[in-house]
Amino acid sequence: MSDRFSFEVLATDGKARRGLVSMPRGAVRTPAFMPVGTAGTVKAMYLDQVRALGSDIILGNTYHLMLRPGAERVARLGGLHDFARWPYPILTDSGGFQVMSLAQLRKLTEKGVTFKSHVDGARYELTPERSIEIQGLLDSDIQMQLDECVALPAEETAIEKAMELSLRWAERCKAAFGDQPGKAMFGIVQGGDRPALRERSAEALKAMSLKGYAVGGLAVGEPQAVMLDMLDVVCPVLPKEKPRYLMGVGTPDDIVKAVMRGIDMFDCVMPTRAGRHGLAYTRRGKINLRNARHAEDPRPLDEESDCTAARDYSRAYLHHLVKSGEALAGMLLTWNNLSYYQSLMQGLRDAIETARLTDHAAALSEGWERGDIPPR
């Protein structure tokens, strides 16, 4: 452990990096996938399980935690780490993405955003300073600037306006965050699907000398090709000695392709949300346990997996649980999915260390394309 926040690149393979983010509460091996703990819990999982699967860090959500139970209450109870019984690193988002989704319930100004709670209709104000204050009360280790995220497709004028506002808010967040050696505040590159705007945003944030940088606004409905094009623009601009975080992404294929372009950190609700809806991620691709063809299939999801949920339960049983609406279905499939995601990240780290990432990525893709093999 380190008493300061730091990032070290340990190996490279092409543009991909194998690194280590060090903080007082622990180290994060990169490339890393951060399970989403929206309200202080990774849905359908014990946090001890999440740790055992290989997670070094989880994500908490500022918007949801400020509404329930409230940041001040969490602070009085010892901070989010004690509250949730997760003594390891936590990254909190700023709340900006969730507020974006409340377009009919919000008012955006230079000062910040006012919005009505989706919980009880109460009115709140979220400014850059208040966002950092809330994240400080939660006592997270990595805190994100408040930004304005624009859903795509959008007009260039709207994208540029949001990008410029996000840069001004980044300056205010940096001032509010101050000097906290053991923690970090990341800026967020915006600019939609416009390369010139993305480059301007990245250059401006780079000049702020922040401890880390995220790429935002690329999990909002655009095709994968657009996302990859924007990463090709942004990653070369960002400092090589700082961690890079692609927010809200994504599928295993998205992650592999982004790692190959130099991204170090990821988060996404996909593995947990899919698990609650009967969908399993495996090395053979996605398996929909709602499908009737699994009703009498005695095979596990993956006989070679180290995960109990993947190896020791039959597809027939999982299908039964899903069709019966049993809570255990979501628990087992989420367990499987997070296990697969963490094994995916470990495989990528190993491949970068041994300079065989291209071959490894091709083998992963071949497995997904081959798909699941029906029983005889």
Image (cartoon, rainbow, N blue to C red):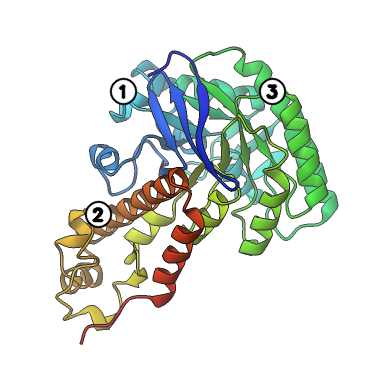
| Count of residue discs | 3
Q: CA distance from mark 2 to mark 3?
A: 42 Å
Residue 316 lies in what quarter of the image?
Answer: bottom left
Quarter of the rendering occupied by the N terminus? top left
Q: Secondary structure at mark 2?
A: helix
Question: Identity of the amino acid at label 2?
Answer: Met
Q: CA distance from mark 3 to mark 1?
A: 31 Å
Question: Identity of the amino acid at label 1?
Answer: Asp
Say which residue appears at 67% left-offset and 35% top-offset.
Answer: 113
Disc 2 target residue = 331
Q: Is residue 296 above or below residue 36?
A: below
Please name whichever residue, 251 or 162, is drawn nearer the observer in this view of the structure: 251
| Position in image of residue 125 (x %, y %) | 62, 30
Q: Earlier in the sequence, mark 3 or mark 1?
A: 1
Q: CA distance from mark 1 to mark 2?
A: 23 Å
Q: Residues within 10 Å of mark 1 (few under 14, many from 20)?
A: some
Position of 134 with respect to 371 (left or right) is right
Say which residue appears at 47% left-offset and 29% top-offset.
Answer: 21
Please name whichever residue, 251 or 320, is drawn nearer the observer in this view of the structure: 251
Disc 3 target residue = 209
| Position in image of residue 265 (x %, y %) | 51, 41
Residue 48 lies in what quarter of the image?
Answer: top left
Question: Identity of the amino acid at label 3?
Answer: Ser
Q: Residues within 10 Å of mark 3 (few under 14, many from 20)?
A: some
Tags 1 and 2 touching, CB below 8 Å: no
Disc 1 target residue = 82
